[in-house]
Image: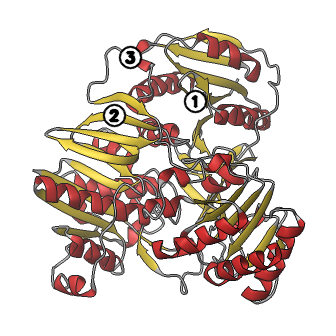
Amino acid sequence: MAEIFVLAEHRQGVIRDVTFEMLGEGKKVAEALGADLTAVLLGSGVQDFAEKLKDWANKVIFVDDPKLENFNAEAYQKVLSSLISERKPVLTMIGNTSFGLDLAPALAVELKMPIATDCIGIEVDGGKVKVIRNIYSGKINARMSFRDDATQYMVTVRASAFPAPESAPGLGGAVESVASPLTEEIDYKKFIAYEEAAVGEVDITAADILVSVGRGIGDVENIPLAEELAKVLGGVVACSRPVVDKKWLPKPRQVGTSGKTVKPKLYLALGISGAFQHLAGMQASDLIVAVNKDPKAPIFSVANYGIVGDIMKVMPVLKDKITELKG
Amino acid sequence: MVDIIVCVKRVPDTSEAEVIIKDDKRAIKDADLTFDINEWDNYAIEEAILKKEALGGKVTVIGVGGEEVNEVLRRCLAKGADEAIRLTDPAFDGSDGYAIAKILSAAIKDLQYDFVFTGAQAGDDSYGVTGQMLAEILGIPHATMVTKVDINNGTARIRRELEGGLEEVDEINKPAVFCIQTGLNEPRYVSIMGIRKVSKKEIPVKAAADIGISADEVGEVGSMVKLEEFSIPPAGELAEMIEGTPDEAAGKLAAILKEKGAF
């Protein structure tokens, strides 16, 4: 029977959410293709993880090797190319994460298998797999198909694009241990250590009100405008990635996938277009207000209230009106 | 001494602009968009120049596309790159990330280099694959989402950005490809004077035949994925829009925030 591989992603002893999101979606795609769903797990001392995954898939294949203790794309690629060459899954799903992006593109080239990255949708059309990718700053969806002669595909799946089922579907798959094909340590690329993020002077995850600025703030000189607004609201200034990249605010202030996940009572998104990495970090906020020049900015699809306009004009007036209403 | 090749792309800036799909649903209307060097590549070229300034060596910048790409390449020369090469051929049209990686590898394989830097992704099609695929084709290691590069003789100690603020430190031997994440340096500004100074510098142009790649390996036929059509993402439940001049809208918003108990 045809098979779909989902590569389990884990780090520092935890199976990452994207794994369950892929297994949930993978089950649907497997049904549409008439295929079995197989979870593939690589690591060192991962038998417990394999047991944990068996209710999520028709089968769990795991490769346990001390050389796979920490993620190394080179080692993972060798093991996966061997597994995929042997078992010929019709579709291989990998997270579109820092882990998956270091691994999947080179693996696909080695296997001469077409890959579509950062997919937010997977469709089966006449037995062929098609994907939806979200591009141009999140403003366009592209439906893409694979090279005509392809019979096997690889996709990387955007984290949070699919909901993880609340509980395992109880597939009770068989757990199969496969011997590691790795014969020696990879000496040209070595994992050294993890480094935790620096702790900032302000904890944005503890604030009830966040005044969050993005690229639209335009210049570091405009940051005080946001600080003044935050002050009258009794809140704290946060930001999206471009503001940290430009060194206008320190990294601990960043909301999003590579920064902090926040859930304040009020999130004011000012000049933030709403890249999915940002939305993933703030969409659970109680009340979201967005101000942006582009009426089609993705931020408006998660906001409760929106203003189409220039934040440089809106911010000072908003500050004054709030001061007025506070009396 | 360190020789670094940097691959750059010219892309439209869509972060703050409205994006409109053309009638054929296979492209966007770009007449009103501003084009510039891909943001990730801008950090990559800066990092390469910083390394050259610290260690000596040479920076070569490579772009794929028509004459309009010269503007981006010239900007890199003005920043401090030593040489630029433009790869162009009608056969390259419609290339996906894989076909671009093949084109780049064909040009790079005969050059002298210690490291190749690319952006971790491009702001237009966001494949995020070119550097890793280039490394695989060249038969050398790579790392993506790179936020720090320290080069010491034949080895680089790098940091990779993971999720939630976590980073990973790795050691990679040269030659290697690093796909650079935004934010790892502060890209320098180039003045019009600076660009004028390099305006006479010749940018060699190479076609498919010059780099020994055949037409069926590139473009749409040489790609892994095919575009079917563009659409506007379903909006979901949209925000309640507050209308009016900035003054009026800000006033209405202040009243809503008060009503909701925000202050």
Q: Earlier in the sequence, mark 1 or mark 3?
A: 1
Q: Amino acid at mark 2?
A: Asp
Can you tell which mark lies on residue A182? Answer: 3
Q: Is residue A281 left or right of residue A301?
A: left
Q: Select label 2 or label 3 by which is in front.
A: 2
Q: Position of residue B105 (x, y in %)?
A: 29, 53
Say which quadrant the C terminus of chain B sits in: bottom right
Cα gap from disc 2 to disc 3, whole angstroms: 20 Å
* Viewer-closest of B240 and A97: B240
Residue B222 seen by the camera: no
The chain to which mark 1 is attached is: A
Q: Which mark is residue A305?
A: none
What is the quadrant of residue B241 in the picture?
bottom right
Query: x, y (%) of residue B112?
Result: 14, 52
Instruction: Using the rendered view, name the quadrant where residue A134 is placed.
Output: bottom right
Secondary structure at badge 2 equals: strand
The residue identified by callout 2 is: B170
For disc 1, the marked residue is: A9
